[in-house]
Amino acid sequence: MNLFDVPLAVDEGDPEPYAGVGYARLGPQLGAEKLGMTVYELPPGKSNCPYHYEVGNEEWVVALTERLSVRTPDGEVELEPWDVLCFPDGEAGAHRFTNRTEEPVRFAVLSTKIDPSAAVYPDSQKIGIWPPGKLFRLGDAVDYWDGEV
C-alpha cells in the first residue's frame, strides 16, 4: 500500500473546521490487529480532530507533505515532510493537527490498538470511551458508590 496513492474517504456532516478532511484507515486493509495507521489529508485551514490525548494507547505522527502544524501541551510546532513526533499515553501526549498552509497536507498517524481505551478532550472537558464509542462531560462525575448502596 502506498501512503501517497491510498484512496481517501470523507465523512459527510462534520462541522468546521473538520469538514472535508480525507482519511484512510490502513490497519484493517493490511490485516493488522495490534497497530493501526490512518493517513489524513487536510485541506487548507482544516483540522482532523479536536485537541485530545489518549489513555491506554500511544500515537505517532509522520508528516508526509507540506508543513503540518501540531498543537501540543508545550505549544504549537510545525513538522516538515518526514518529521516524526510521538504522543505518549496520557496528558503529556495531547495533540491536534491543523493545516496552516495554502496546499493540502498529508500525514500518517500510527497507534497502538488496545481496547478499551479513552480519549480526553481538555478544551471541551469531555472523555470518550471506546468501545462503546460514547462521550461524557468530565463535570458529570459521580461518587464511586453512587447507585450502589
Image (cartoon, rainbow, N blue to C red):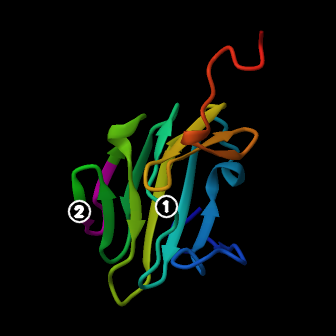
Could you tell me which secondary element the residue under label 2 belongs to?
strand
Q: Residues within 10 Å of mark 2 (few under 14, many from 20)?
A: few
Residue in the image at 65% along x and 39% along y: 129
Residue 106 covered by magenta stretch? no
Q: Is residue 51 above or below residue 18?
A: above
- Mark nearer the N terminus (1 vs 2): 1
Could you tell me which secondary element the residue under label 1 belongs to?
loop
* Foreground: disc 1 or disc 2: 1
Residue 148, x across and y down, in percent: 77, 13
One can see residue 21 in this view: yes
70 left or right, relative to 18: left
Locate residue 69: give its quadrant: bottom left
148 left or right, relative to 135: right
Nearer the observer, 18 or 127: 127
Q: Which residue is mark 2?
A: 77
Nearer the observer, 67 or 3: 67
Q: Magenta stretch? A: 78-85
Residue in the image at 41% along x and 60% along y: 96
Residue 82 covered by magenta stretch? yes
Q: Which quarter of the image is occupied by the C terminus?
A: top right
Most distant residue in the bottom direction: 102
Q: Amino acid at mark 2?
A: Val
Q: Amino acid at mark 1?
A: Pro
Q: Which residue is mark 1?
A: 50
Residue 51, x across and y down, in percent: 44, 57
Residue 10, x across and y down, in percent: 67, 75
Q: Residues within 10 Å of mark 1 (few under 14, many from 20)?
A: some
